[in-house]
Image (tube, grey):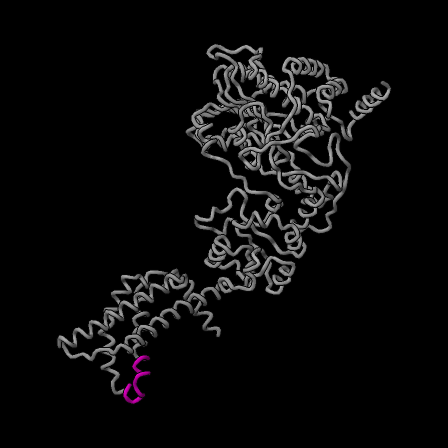
Amino acid sequence: MKWLSSLTNWYFSKKALPYWGLLFLDCLIVLFSGYVVYFVHLDGLSFLDNFWPMTYRLLFLMPFFILFFRLFHTYSGIVRFSSFIDLLHVIYANFCATLTSYLACIAIDRADFFDIIPFTFSESLGLFIVASLFMGALRIVVKSLYDLFRQDSFTKRVFIYGVHAGGVGLAKSIQNQNPMQYKVVGFVTPDEYKYSEYLMGALVRHDSPTLIQHMKDKGAEILMVSPLEAEHFRTREDLINDLIANDIKIMMMPQAEEWDGHSDFQHQHLHEVDIEDLLPRNKIEVNMEAIGKFLSGKVIMITGAAGSIGSEMVRQIATFGPSELVLIDQAETPMHVIRLMMMRAFPNIKALTIVTSITDKQHMEKLFSEHRPDYVFHAAAYKHVPMMEDNPGQAVRNNIYGTHVIADLAVKYGTKKFVMISTDKAVNPTNVMGCSKRICEIYCQSLNKAISDGTCPLEVAEGVEKPITQFVTTRFGNVLGSNGSVIPIFKEQIRKGGPVTVTHPDIIRFFMLIPEACKLVLEAGTMGKGGEIFVFDMGKPVRIADLAMRMIKLSGAKNVEIKFTGLRDGEKLYEEVLSDMESTKPTIHPKIMIANVREYDYNTVCADENRLIKAAEEFDDMNIVRIMKEIVPEYKSNSSKYCVLDKNDEEEKKSK
C-alpha cells in the first residue's frame, strides 16, 4: 500500500484540484451512472448490443448536467473541505438536470425533431440516485482520506467540554487544521439527557466520575473547553483536580477573548490554561450604554494611572471617548508605558501623562485649576501590607493625606463625582494599610455628608457656585495579575524548583480579574448618588494552599514542596467586605451592594486626620498607629509589633 500513500500525499500536497478536473470527474460519474442504470434494466447481452445508442443518449444529457453543475457551483469548492452543504448542492444539481433532461427528451420525441429514444421515468430516477450517490461518495472518500493522511504520530486526541454552538464550532475548527494537530475523539456535557448520544461521529460523555477513565480509554491527552461552557467548567473543581492529577491538559480561551457565540470561532485562540483561567468566577455584565453617557466627552482624571487597577481604568474609560484624560502617577517608567499605549491604541484622545505625587498639593491644584476634571477616579495608594507595617508614616502621608488633597481640590474645582477605590482590607482592619484606607473612606463619606447638608466649609474656585461633588467609594479584594500578586510570586518560585511559600495552611482570599473589577467600579460610579460605599460580590474564596498545589501540578514540575512560613505582619486568615457593624442593601446590579455604614461628623474627622498627619511628620511609628487605632476602634493588629498597643488598651479598660 506504499504506492497509495505516496499517491495520496502527492495529491494532498497540491492546493486544490483544478475546477475543470472536478467537473470532468463529475461528468464521467454521470456517464458511468447511466451505464449502471442500463445494466440493471437490461441483461448482459442486450447491454452490449445497445452500448453505443446508450452512450449517445447519455451524451445528450451531459449539457443539462454541466449547466446545473455551473448554476449550483458543484465544482467550485475544494473537495477535501466538502461539507453537508456541498452534498446538498450536488443533489440539487443532479435533480434539476435529471428532471430537465427527462422533460426535454419527451418534448423532442413528441415534436419529432430528430430520432432519440426518450428516457423512462424509472431510468431517470435511477440515474439521479446513482449519480448523486457516486458523486457524494467521491467527496466523502477524498475528505476522509485527507483527514486520515493529515494525522500522524504527533496528532493529539482530545475531548471537548461542551456540545452546543461553542463545542461544535471548536470541533469544526480543529477538523479544518492543516496539518492536523488534534483529533476529536469525544465530547463532554454537563447535561444528563445528552448522555450516550453521538456528535460529529464522536461519543458524548456525561460530566461524571467515570469521565477520566473514558478519556484514558480513548487515549485522550487534552480536554478543550468550549468558551460557552467556561463559566460552568470553572466551578467543577473535582473534575479539574482529577484532570490535573491524571496529566490530562486543559485548554481554554484567554478570559479577555471568550467567544461571543456568533462570530467565527478560531481554535488558535485556545491555550493551555494558567491558574487564572481556572479560578471560579462569574461573568460580569455592566450597563455599557449608561457608562458611555456618563464618561463620553468629559474630562476624566485618574490617579494611580500606571498601577494595575489604574492602567485598566485608563484603557476602559478611553473606549468611551472622553474629551481629555488627565493621568497621574509617580512611577516614571510605568507612566511611559501608559503614554505609548495611549498613542498606539487611542491616538485621537487627548491624554496627559503626568509624573507627580498626589501629596504635592501645589502641583495638584495647578492641574485641577487648568483641567477642571468632571470626574475623578482615585486609584493611587500604597497597597502592600508588609511594607506599610514598616512604614506607617508613608501610609498616612500617601494614602490619607493624598486622598485629603485630591478630595478637597475636587470640591473646590467643581468635580461632579469622585470615585475612590478602596479595599476589603479596610474592613475590620488588622494592618496599617487597611486602616489607612478605612480612614480615607471615612473622610470621603464625611465630606459628602457635609456637602449634602450644606455645611461644607471648603472654599470653591471662581466659576463654581457651591460644592457639588458626589463621593462614591468602591470596595473589593485581590485582583489577579496585580503588582505583587501571589500568583506571579508562586510562578517564579516553581520555576526555580521551590519551595512555594504560603503563610498559613488555612489562609483564604477572594480573587477577581482586573478588567471585571474595573467594570464594576465604572458601574458603581455611574449609579452612585454620593456617600455610598459599594461592595462587590467577589464570588467564592480560594484557599491559597490549594492554589499553590494546583499551580505546581499545572506546571508539571516535580518534587516542588509547599512551605508554610507563618502569617506576615498585619495579615489575617480571611478578608471581609463588611465589618461586624455593617450590612448591605442591594442595587440594580446583582454583583454590587451598598454597605450600611455609620456616619461621621466632618469637623471631627478633619481634626483627627490633622492630628494623625502631624504625627506622621515625626515618624514615630507607635504614636502614628496609636492615633489610627483611636480613629478606627475596630483596627486590631495581627501578627505585628503594634499588637502591644491593643494589649495596653485592654489592660487600661480592665483597670478602669
- On screen, 506 above or below 8? above
Is residue 402 at least partly visible in the picture? no
Residue 191, horizontal then vertical, whole percent:
56, 56
Residue 420, horizontal then vertical, whole percent:
58, 25
Residue 509, horizontal then vertical, whole percent:
68, 38
The residue sitting at the right extreme is 655
Give left or right: position of 579 versus 592: right
Residue 53, horizontal then vertical, whole percent:
22, 82
- On screen, 119 above or below 223? below
- On screen, 481 above or below 1? above
- On screen, 635 above or below 610? below
- Work out which quarter of the rendered image holds the C terminus and state it: top right
Q: Main secondary structure of the magenta part?
A: helix
* Image quadrant assignment for residue 35: bottom left
* Image quadrant assignment for residue 537: top right
> As rendered, which of 268 and 568 lies closer to the eye?
568
Whether 344 is among the magenta residues is no
Tally of numbered tags: 0
| Residue at x 55%, y 56% (from the top left corner) | 160
> As rendered, which of 329 and 442 lies closer to the eye?
442
Whether 37 is among the magenta residues is yes
| Residue at x 57%, y 13% (from the top left corner) | 456
Magenta span of residues: 36-47
Is residue 629 at least partly visible in the picture? yes
> As rendered, which of 208 and 565 lies closer to the eye?
208
| Residue at x 83%, y 19% (from the top left corner) | 652
| Residue at x 60%, y 34% (from the top left corner) | 536
> As rendered, which of 633 and 167 lies closer to the eye?
633
Give left or right: position of 374 versus 408: left
